[in-house]
Amino acid sequence: GTMKYRGARIQVLDLPGIIEGAAAGKGRGRQVISAARTCDLIMIVLDAGKPVTHKFLIERELMNFGIRLNEEPPLVVIRKKDKGGID
């Protein structure tokens, strides 16, 4: 669903069932993880009764799918050159 906060529309997703091998297509993993590709923020909520390795498994699956966690966005600079287009 979506919600509004201070004039911004925020999409809220529930990504159930991220399992080991999801990024490689195990189960419905690719479908589940692909929904997260358009998010600006991913909040991982864990069951306190599960071992901390479950958190690492989720992070690894998202990273294997190309979703960067806890990293700054890449710095992209486009400069106009005097000749030859852009640099």
Image (cartoon, rainbow, N blue to C red):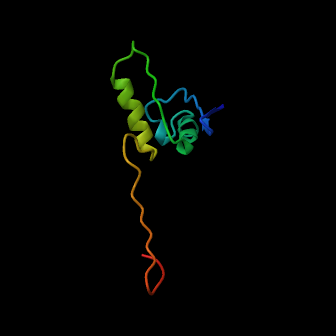
Q: Residue furthest top?
A: 49
Q: Residue at x 45, y 44 (%)?
A: 67
Along the viewing direction, whichever of 48 and 54 lies nearer the viewer: 48
Q: Residue furthest left?
A: 52
Q: Residue at x 39, y 58 (%)?
A: 75
Q: Quadrant of the C terminus?
A: bottom left
Left-right relation of 53 to 1: left
Q: Residue at x 51, y 40 (%)?
A: 25
Along the viewing direction, whichever of 4 and 21 lies nearer the viewer: 4
Image vertical order of residue 45 relative to residue 7, above or below: above
* Residue 83, picture quadrant: bottom left
What x and y, as percent, mark residue 9? 63, 38
Q: Residue furthest front?
A: 6
Left-right relation of 80 to 28: left
Image vertical order of residue 28 relative to residue 52, above or below: below
What x and y, as percent, mark residue 6? 59, 35
Q: Quadrant of the N terminus?
A: top right
What x and y, as percent, mark residue 12? 59, 32
Along the viewing direction, whichever of 33 and 46 lies nearer the viewer: 46
Along the viewing direction, whichever of 20 and 49 lies nearer the viewer: 49
What x and y, as percent, mark residue 42? 48, 35
Image vertical order of residue 74 relative to residue 8, above or below: below
* Residue 34, picture quadrant: top right
**Numbered label tally:** 0
* Residue 56, picture quadrant: top left
Q: Residue furthest bottom?
A: 83
